[in-house]
Amino acid sequence: MKKKSGSFSPIRETSNMTHRPMKKGKQLNKLPQPKRAHPPQQSRKNTPFRPSSVEEHIFWCDRCNVALIGNKCGICGQDGSRLDLSAPGDVRFCSPYERGVLAQQLLSAYNCDPIGERIVLLNKIPGDDRTDEVIVDGLVFGVLYFDLRSMDFRFKPSADGAAILVPQTDRRTVVLEKTRSHLSGKKVRCEHIREHSSDIRKGDPVLVVSGDLVGVGFSYIDSITIDSSGNDTDAVKVRKVRKGVLQLNPTIASMGDVIKANLTYLQRLGKDAMNTVKGIANQPAHRDLEVHVSFSGGKDSLVVLDLALSALKKRSVQAFFLNTGLEFPETVDFVHHFCEHHGVDLVEEGSGTAFWDHVDSFGPPAKDFRWCCKICKLAPANVVIEDCRNKGTVCLTVDGKRKYESFSRSKISSSEMNPFVPEQLNIFPIRNWRAIEVWLYIYWRGMEYNPLYDMGFERVGCYLCPSSLTSEYQRLGEIHPEMYEQWNSYLLRWAKKHGLSREYVKHGFWRWRELPAKMIKLAEHLNVDTRPRQTESSFSIRVTSGSSPCKDGSFSAEGVVEGVTLNEAAAVMNVLGHTVHSNELGMVLVKTPRASIKIFSTGAIKVTGATKDAALSAFNDAAVELLRVNKCTECGICLKACPIDAIEIGGKHGSLFIRDSCIQCGKCTEACVVIKYSDKLLPDILEHCGLP
């Protein structure tokens, strides 16, 4: 530890603490214990979504030192302490790979790893990429995150984490003068620093000590600059402090202990989930149907497969695997091995080279442009559904979707008809489960699982999926360099064609067509141009096949639109009828009184109506609304025309957005200047549809 010029007291005298590792079992009973709950008024500004009916907390048994999914410990019988979680609260166990990353970060920054062999939980929180609260012994130890600027992992300790680290390190530490003033959130000038370590760089998180206060902050300047700068130079921003140091619980629990402590709750969860499957599958209308389990090779689908097999022992249960042609080899091997080893009937449908056949036409898929889902997933899924349709039955499918995963899944019911495939009835038995409960079930049942989870992947899916994390994409390059190189080479060629740099690809900007605010900020910081230099295609829409009769007596009309994204289409279609938008399937479905309209991320449009006139009229209505959103000038005339305030302009949804509350009165359409002159802008469409 380096003294600041003019400083005379060593750190142990200033803080009345020692920096030697504490002996195991030593208690600090006189020091205040950390708060285990966030204040009720804690800000949720950066929360990506907030599922309905969620539990943003778990419990912790301090005696047995285990996490609890219920309030009572199954080992000692005592009530656990409540540990509130940052939303959405989908806490999970730290994987071996993640534990190695965390250890490397601690050793590199602080030359110690106080966690040792303890079980660590990770709670996903908002961030630019992978960002997790690290929970140890019921304490939030800090945040482990992947920095898109440096393209590497970083660790920021919390105030409790600092209280654990301070007795064991003198690295990245500053000692401040004792003060009675409030320190949390304050800037500290050089003149108030009595000592500091010599390894601090600008922007580093630092451990802060001031008398008996311990906390964390970040440095405005390097160590060498602290000594050479004037006394009035800001040196450190203190984030949060607490009283006293901390020692971790002397009891180190095993996974077996965690399972034993939660066994009663696990049994109840499993029973409730099986009852959900049985209650729907055994209804008179479904009793004779085959049951399909959507088996992707991921943890959630693994659990629902086990639940379905346990619940329906006398029924025919098939595992259905959609091989997109973009799966990790580990996933394909695991699916085949698991089904073969357990005698599960496996139905596999694949899309072959469909992705690579279409990628040059559509460009790389993005979070807001998932054309690949329709081609690689929906098409092969229809094979199984078509088989059920030919038998005159619905396709009964058990699915592992959970409401904690995304906003679009946050309101799922125990069973739902697929809005995009009416012949499919989905059952969601673990819709209310969190990741920790999924993993506890897997460990409890002693089930083998996809090895990718232990190799650094939080989710299992297509290896080049834009919804994957950049940290996972980087990990792909380490374990499958040939797969990484194939996709990265394509991205670089695509970027060059559109006048974009290698940095654009490296930092993952390709994963969005319309960049969110966090990526715009990152681009500004890195000075990366994210605007394609080639002119985007102008708006156009054309009919590819006129109205034609369908087998069921209805009529359909099909076409193609360019210049409008799927999100933009979804933003306005409520004016025509009830709208369902799925980025996962790359589709917008609109139900009007006389017709249904399907718009795909590929630009395809299909309209089906009871009559020829209904199909053509609905196609025309869709065309002018798509033109409306493309040509919107944000004049605001429609805002005044709407009687129920269902329209938003220039907000977070884009230039024009019509809310679900729209009553389809048509007043905004009548007032829109773009639509008023649509016959001049879209004469060919109107003529083809035979409409004035």
Image: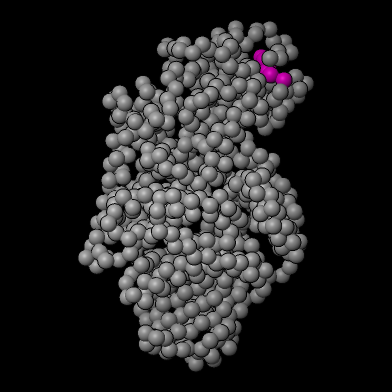
On the image, the x and y values in percent for residue 566 come to 53, 67
Q: Quadrant of residue 25?
A: top left
Quarter of the image containing the N terminus?
top right
Q: Quadrant of residue 665?
A: bottom left
Q: How many marks can you see?
A: 0
Q: Residue at x 40, y 55 (%)?
A: 344
Q: Is residue 282 visible?
A: yes
Between residue 56 and residue 102, name the one nearer to us: 102
Q: Is residue 89 within the magenta segment? A: no
Q: Residue at x 43, y 81 (%)?
A: 608
Between residue 394 and residue 540, name the one nearer to us: 394
Q: Is residue 81 above or below residue 492?
A: above
Which residue is situated farthest in the right direction here? 228
Does residue 132 appear to the left or right of 111 in the view shown? left
Between residue 175 and residue 424, name the one nearer to us: 424
Q: Residue at x 52, y 61 (%)?
A: 323
Between residue 401 and residue 165, name the one nearer to us: 401
On the image, the x and y values in percent for residue 568 come to 54, 67
Does residue 204 appear to the left or right of 279 in the view shown? right
Please report the bounds of the magenta region as a residue range.
Answer: 191-198
Q: Is residue 530 visible?
A: no
The colour scheme is: one colour
On the image, the x and y values in percent for residue 132 come to 52, 38
On the image, the x and y values in percent for residue 165 come to 56, 21
Q: Is residue 10 above or below residue 538?
A: above
Q: Residue at x 58, y 11 (%)?
A: 20
